[in-house]
Amino acid sequence: MKKKGKGGIPPISTASLPDVIFMILFFFMISTSMRETDILVKTQLPSASEVAKLEKKQLVSHIYIGQPVDSQQAQWGTAPQIQLNDSYQRLPDILEFVASERDKLSEADRMAMTVMIKADKSTRMGIISDVKQELRRANALKISYAASKTLAAGQ
């Protein structure tokens, strides 16, 4: 019994390799979410020992409060500013912001809309209270505060 030929391993076909690469590329393009808002304020979140994650992030609208970033301080100064979407706004603009965010949601999800306040830990409580008053006027009663989790001393 004698084998014919050299009996080596046959070469691997790379003809389908571009198809596989494009499928992986499309997967990541579809599953990746892009940042929707450019953050224009400095926010060092306050620490908290008990934090909970929000379940439906698509129902959350963000209000950022803090000192403008360094590139914006020449124009806006160093006083805390309110950022709604991609621009600085004033307190009365919160009513329009909440209305436009509600209009983006379906009728069933409008009651579950949550407004998250991401405020710098050095921001005075007066501006946060004013924002909360405007949210009450806009009937946005589900409010969440962003915080960073800290470990307890015993852990």
Image (cartoon, rainbow, N blue to C red):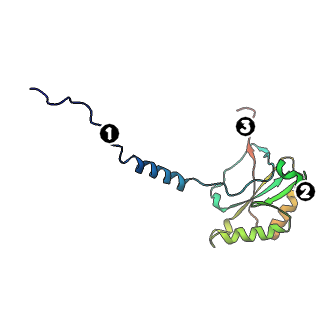
Residue 39 disc label: none
Which residue is depicted at the point 81% across and 48% down? 42
Residue 54, picture quadrant:
bottom right
Q: Residue 29 at x, y = what percent? A: 54, 54
Question: Where does the C terminus fall, quadrant-wise?
Answer: top right
Circle 2 or circle 3, nearest the eye = 2
**Residue on which the image places disc 3:** 151
**Residue on which the image places disc 1:** 12
Residue 126 disc label: 2
Q: Residue furthest top?
A: 1
Say whether residue 44 is visible. yes
122 or 70: which is nearer to us? 70
User: Are the residues flagged by discs 1 and 2 in contact, CB closer than 8 Å?
Assistant: no
Which residue is depicted at the point 66% across and 54% down? 35
Q: Residue 87 at x, y = what percent? A: 79, 61
Q: Residue 65 at x, y = what percent? A: 82, 55
